[in-house]
Amino acid sequence: NAGVTQTPKFQVLKTGQSMTLQCAQDMNHNSMYWYRQDPGMGLRLIYYSASEGTTDKGEVPNGYNVSRLNKREFSLRLESAAPSQTSVYFCASSLRTGNSPLHFGNGTRLTVT
Amino acid sequence: DQQVKQNSPSLSVQEGRISILNCDYTNSMFDYFLWYKKYPAEGPTFLISISSIKDKNEDGRFTVFLNKSAKHLSLHIVPSQPGDSAVYFCAPTNFGNEKLTFGTGTRLTIIP
């Protein structure tokens, strides 16, 4: 009963380095999301995917790319990391029927120095 | 332009008493409202929701109240228990719109 699995849990990058955050869900959900959480800011949507092969920008997409590899997996890529991207990143999924609740992973804590 | 505000960053309540968490929004198009709860080092989990056709929704110890004219909702927890210590986010949206707008969160601490 894994739900939404994110890897890695922690990552430290130097400015300019690239990395991909991985996310997989085993609930057969249609929609997947990437959020970032910063102190005093709540959770902000980076990118969203309503179904395999489709992606859509959220509130804060600059500096990120995403890939919906299949129904299960949705990855987030930082091509050239910046200190402003230091944050906790959460992946989520939902059934996409009405307003079915989002199911979140446990997050990836990223520090960019 | 923050559409959703939770003006109390933190709240401490004695065990057994009522906890009241507040959320204000500016977008009058919001018609569906969710609350999420988050423990440290975990992702948020869905707690309770309410549609704009109602002004109250209850689930066990948790009740959400909606005042559409004031663009205000509140979450009541009665009685409060130590396991309720967490950060609570409100997330208003439009029914069918999955792009949730989260508030800044309120950290609730229940004092034994």
Image (cartoon, rainbow, N blue to C red):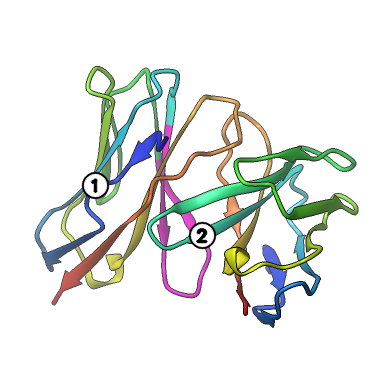
Measured as percent of width and height from the top left, residue B59 is found at: 32, 44
Q: Which residue is mark 1?
A: B7
Q: Chain of mark 1?
A: B
Q: Label 1 neighbourhood size at 10 Å, few (<14), some (14-19), many (20+)?
A: some
Majority SS type along the magenta span: strand
Q: Is residue A50 left or right of residue A42?
A: right
Q: Position of residue A50 (x, y in %)?
A: 76, 37
Residue B46, horizontal then vertical, whole percent: 47, 51
Q: Is A42 on the left-hand or right-hand side of A81?
A: left
Q: Is residue A85 above or below residue B90?
A: below
Quarter placement of the C terminus of chain B: bottom left
Helix, strand or loop status at disc 2? strand
Q: Amino acid at mark 1?
A: Asn
Q: Which residue is mark 2?
A: A37
The image quarter containing residue A113 is bottom right
User: Which residue does the image show at 11% across and 64% down from the upper left?
Assistant: B16
The residue positioned 60% from the left and 41% from the top of the image is A59
Horizontal side of A33 relative to B107 (left or right) equals: right
Q: Find out whether residue B46 is within the magenta segment.
A: yes
Label 2, label 1: how far apart the Cα atoms are = 17 Å
- The quadrant of the picture occupied by the N terminus of chain B is top left
User: Which stretch did the figure color magenta?
Assistant: B33-48
